[in-house]
Amino acid sequence: MKRPPPLSAAKFYAILDTGYAPAERFVELAQAVLAGGADIVQVRAKNSTTAQRIKLLQAVAPLCAAANVPLICNDDLTAALAVENVGLHIGQDDLPARDARLALGPDRLLGLSTHSFAQAQNALALGDVLSYFAVGPVFKTGTKPDYVPVGLELVKRVAALNPSLPWFCIGGIHQTNAAQVRSAGARAIVAVSEVIRASNPANVVKALRQTME
């Protein structure tokens, strides 16, 4: 199988989230975000069972494979391991990154959420373990209502580190503010509700990706 392009070239990370769309729409949404040019796709199903997550991953995986785009499972190691080539994204309170890497093996992607400068520095110190890290939420977001936005200042501070790992800015990012995030130094972004709720998700992905280019 052809290897996907390096994540360092990625501009847009799509998340299919059951908080915004029913599981029945995931195939349709995956087709749309891939058509729009998503460089990486994540399945996030917080209130689902592992078995349900595996079904979602199995439904989306062939589409991602055909498009040569990596597929990630949010915070469920068992589900990720159940489907070939699926990576894992973890948060600060989830399985430690080194333990996750040990379980995943060397070839699957592993990402980590960070919410402060110190956490971003720690992610960079795990460069031998992580494939990428995320910084956010940059702006207030309904996806993580309990999180205080980190703001563009943190994006600037992380960008100033010139991270050796690929990194993505996430949280409340829309077509109206994506250019601000790019100007702050972001290399790549994640958008969830802006894409999933759109009448034409492919066009939204295309527009956001163009902003980052």
Image: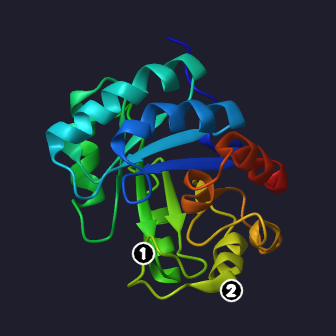
Colour basis? rainbow
Q: Is residue 56 visible?
A: yes
Q: Are marks 2 and 1 in contact (CB under 8 Å)?
A: no
Q: Which residue is mark 2?
A: 153
Q: Is residue 103 visible?
A: no
| Secondary structure at numbered mark 2 | helix
Q: As rendered, which of 22 and 64 lies closer to the eye?
A: 22
Mark positioned earlier in the residue sequence (2 or 1): 1
Residue kind at label 1, given as amino acid type: Lys
Locate residue 163, reporting x and y percent. 63, 62
Locate residue 51, reporting x and y percent. 15, 37
Say few, some or many: other residues with alpha carbon within 10 Å of mark 2 (under 14 / 14 to 19 / 20 or more).
some
Locate residue 34, reporting x and y percent. 62, 32
Left/right of residue 149 with respect to residue 119 in the rendered view: right
| Secondary structure at numbered mark 1 | loop
Residue kind at label 2, given as amino acid type: Glu
Residue at the spot x=51%, y=41% of the render? 41
Residue at the spot x=15%, y=47% of the render? 49
Which image quadrant for residue 33?
A: top right
Q: As rendered, which of 158 and 196 lies closer to the eye?
A: 196
Say few, some or many: other residues with alpha carbon within 10 Å of mark 1 (under 14 / 14 to 19 / 20 or more).
few
Q: Which residue is mark 1?
A: 144
Left/right of residue 196 with respect to residue 123 in the rendered view: right
Locate residue 40, reporting x and y percent. 55, 40
Q: On screen, 20 above or below 200?
A: below
Q: Determine the CA span between mark 2 and mark 1.
A: 19 Å
Between tags 2 and 1, which lies in front?
Answer: 1
**Of the numbered discs in the image, which one, if any, rests on residue 34?**
none
Left/right of residue 25 with respect to residue 139 in the rendered view: left
